[in-house]
Image (cartoon, helix red, strand yellow):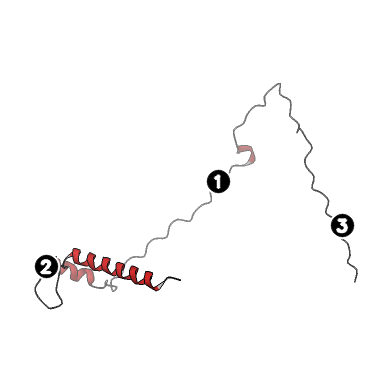
Amino acid sequence: MIRPGEALVFLSLAAGLHVGAWSLAGQLRGAGGDGAAQPAAVALAVATPQQSALMRDWQAPPDMTTDTPAPSAPPPATPPRRPGIEQAGPHLAPLAGLTPVRPAAPPLRRPDPLPTVALAP
């Protein structure tokens, strides 16, 4: 547990640092709470008639009464042609003078499972 004296010292130190940071930051610009005029950060301008018409057209819902032609269906897809076994790869002539290589060791066999023992009742 923190001793009450340490808590009081560190709490006052944190509060002092916060107050110091706020005083160094200065006053914030913008509209004050008292209603006084402040320098504006953004300048506003009136829209031109072309811009107003563009916004009106953009915000209007689309006209669904006109008939649009339905898109034509794509042609049916044909499956790709698969080559047969005789066409599967390049035809290479066998190399003369080579003998087939046998495996160095017989293949590994799986061990036989343990015999099951019936439990006595």
The kind of secondary structure element at disc 2 is loop
Q: Which quadrant of the structure image shows residue 114?
A: bottom right
Q: Which quadrant of the structure image shows residue 9?
A: bottom left
Q: Name the residue under label 3.
A: 115
Q: Is residue 59 left or right of residue 79?
A: left
Q: Is residue 31 above or below residue 116?
A: below
Q: Mark 2 points at which residue?
A: 40
The kind of secondary structure element at disc 3 is loop
Q: What residue type is labelled 1?
A: Arg
Q: Mark 1 points at which residue?
A: 81
Earlier sequence position, callout 1 versus callout 3? 1
The kind of secondary structure element at disc 1 is loop
Q: What residue type is labelled 2?
A: Ala
Q: In this view, does 9 lie to the left or right of 54?
A: right
Q: Which residue lies furthest to the right in this view?
A: 120
Residue at 59 percent of width and 33 percent of height: 90
Instruction: Estimate how packed mark 2 is, as few (under 14), some (14 to 19) or many (20 or more) residues with alpha carbons within 10 Å.
Output: few
